[in-house]
Amino acid sequence: EDGYELWLRYRKVEDPGQLKRYRAALSNLVRQGGGPLQKSAADELARGLSALLGTKVTPRAAAPSGPALVVGTRDSSPLIRSLVPAADLADLGEEGYVVRRVTKNGSSHVVVAAHGDRGVLYGAFHLLRLVQTCRPLEHIDLTESPAAPLRVADHWDNIDGSIERGYAGLSFFDWAELPKLDERYTDYARALASLGINGAVINNVNTPATYLAEPFLTKLAALAGVLRRYGVTLYVTANFAAPIDLDGLATADPFDPGVRSWWSKKADEIYHRIEDFGGFLVKANSEGRPGPLDYGRTHADGANLLADALRPHGGIVMWRAFVHDTDAKWDRQGYLDFTPLDGKFADNVVLQIKNGPIDFQVREPAHPLFGSLPHTNSMIELQVTQEYTGHSTHVCYLVPQWKEVLDFDTLKAGPGSTVAAVVTGEVHSYTHYGFAGVMNFGDSRNWTGSHLAAANTHGYGRLAWNPRLSAAELADEWTRLTFGNDQHVVTTVTTLLLGSWHTYEDYTAPLGTGYITHPPDGSVTGHFDPSPTTTTQFHKSDRDGIGYDRTAATGDGYTELYAPAVRDAYESLENCPEELLLFLHHVPYTHRLDSGKTVIQHIYDTHFSGAAKVGEMREAWNGLRRRVDRRRLTDVDRQLGEQLTQAARWRDTLVAYWFELSRIRDEHRGWLQAVVAPADTALLGGERNELPVQVVNATGSGL
Ligand code: BDP
């Protein structure tokens, strides 16, 4: 197995009793009418069930004489009309569905019914999941609809095939070949739809304007055609200076009539080609990108310019809140720039806000903009690709991290105004809201570069559908879909996944230490290697202490951006959540934690225990020999071997760094006083695998 099928591996059901029951219930597939999405649903069921049941399943339109699997909408299918009352589907919207047993004329049918065709497709994938994970269908009766309308996959892919922060090969969007279509586009669309993802932004946030003109419009239209059959809407990142770059206008000022009419004509042109085009994603006035501030206008002016052009066609603008001019106020700038604009954005604009205030670090508090924008549509941006969390080398299952952010109670609109409630439109009356995930897909055969990284893709999509699902449920589901239902495999892999984020945090940046990876230098190792000496502006370590003081009392005042109860907790050394201690406070190395340990001892200990944990992960994985196919077993073993090497580098680099700064001896490993290090200015500036620091034990042999 090479991983290409992702979680859509339809392997024959192993349990003989269950197989018999599934065959009796699901072999006879009936679909009556419906559009292309219903056809995709029936095709997927036929494909999946044929393989799972080991018997050919073919969709038919004729009413069955015995038990059947009946899929469709009341509008298109007389059979569905006779089996499911209208009232049961009325509140489900276009995307919700029911899966249930219905007995009629003595036959017990499994029914997948929806109000809209998209719902039928999602219901079909749900049923397949149930069979893949070997769930009983005897008394099945479930009703589902998504928590939010926007569930988007953001690709940071470039025209030349490179991917910004991509660790799974090159882009699979082949612009040289398009509009010629590759089979992979269909499999991509199937993968998204199977999770309930209904939108895709196919180009980098740092984009040239090129995508908005020929020959790209033709290429985009072809791609949109494939995605449409799976309910995925195409979006494009727009470069704000497109009127200048594409047609030589003198300005891109949102108040210039020529600019306004340029965007409106451009929108007409796009919709002429792609009638269900979703709209634009925009990164403006951030990290050198053009934007409305270049003309003395605001972010709202800029977003509304594009929103006005898209409105007649039903399109939207996803405007990014990731803005920072200087490191010094990076943590607060998004909040300071956007809260004064609350209420000024058009209703077809939605602000896309990263989960935290810095930049997808291993640990950050929830972004203070959540809950602070009662009159501005908001969505959350999560990073599925592991930019700062180990690329495709370190196993780092991010669902637990995302859950912590989503469950965080902002208290901004009273108790219960969690981030999840905000981005699912429950707190404020938003018209557009939801989720964006920066994707980890590339052209590598297994899509994500490492087999286990696909758990993040799956987890993102499923959480966007239902943020109430737990990390444990999602890890269990993904593991069963990916490796089968052997309980030993399920327990081993889920345990490995669920602990992996904390493990990575332990040997890289415990206690909210912050941004500590090597800045990008054009090489793929950017944001991968430890580099404490070049990132002191984030972790603020010096000879006396460690951590970034963001308090109002003595620091930069970041804590003030939260609701009073949160601010008070963050402000106080005693009540601050320990995992964020060094993100919010600067403390002496000897500051005592709840455990009674000093901060420096905790740092030493977690680096050692975290790195050791990787060894245990590898050992546990290798216990799956003969239970997991050879190829994937070897691939993951190799990955964990590399992770082990890298974790040791992180441990040794950082332990040495903080010993060198603090000069405080490790209570448990006394030999740390024997760290041999050059002057700290030169410390660890070196290349990968060329550490200028050597940690030696008491007998002088290398560690
Ligand atoms: C950072 C990435 C950079 C992105 C930027 C963004 O390092 O490549 O362009 O975020 O989100 O995480 O705009």
Image (spheres, rainbow, N blue to C red):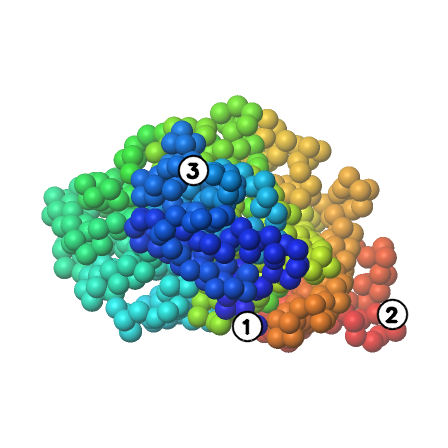
Mark 3, Cα crowd under 10 Å, few <14 / some 14-19 / many 20+, is some
Q: CA distance from mark 2 to mark 3?
A: 77 Å
**Picture quarter with the N terminus:** bottom right
The quadrant where residue 230 appears: bottom left
> At numbered mark 3, what does the secondary structure look like: helix, strand or loop?
helix
The quadrant where residue 172 appears: bottom left
Would residue 45 be seen by someone viewing this image from the given angle? yes
**Residue visible at 22% across and 51% down in the picture:** 275
Q: Position of residue 231 (x, y in %)?
A: 35, 51
Q: Nearer the viewer, mark 2 or mark 1?
A: 1
Q: Of residues 82 and 430, which is closer to you in this image?
A: 82
Mark 2, Cα crowd under 10 Å, few <14 / some 14-19 / many 20+, is few
Q: Of residues 694 and 565, which is closer to you in this image?
A: 565
Q: Amino acid at mark 2?
A: Ala
Q: Are marks 2 and 1 in contact (CB under 8 Å)?
A: no
Q: Position of residue 514 (x, y in %)?
A: 59, 51
In terms of sequence position, does the residue under pointer 2 or pointer 1 come before the other? Answer: 1
Q: Are marks 1 and 3 in contact (CB under 8 Å)?
A: no
Q: Nearer the viewer, mark 2 or mark 3?
A: 3
Q: Which mark is residue 2?
A: 1
Q: Amino acid at mark 1?
A: Asp
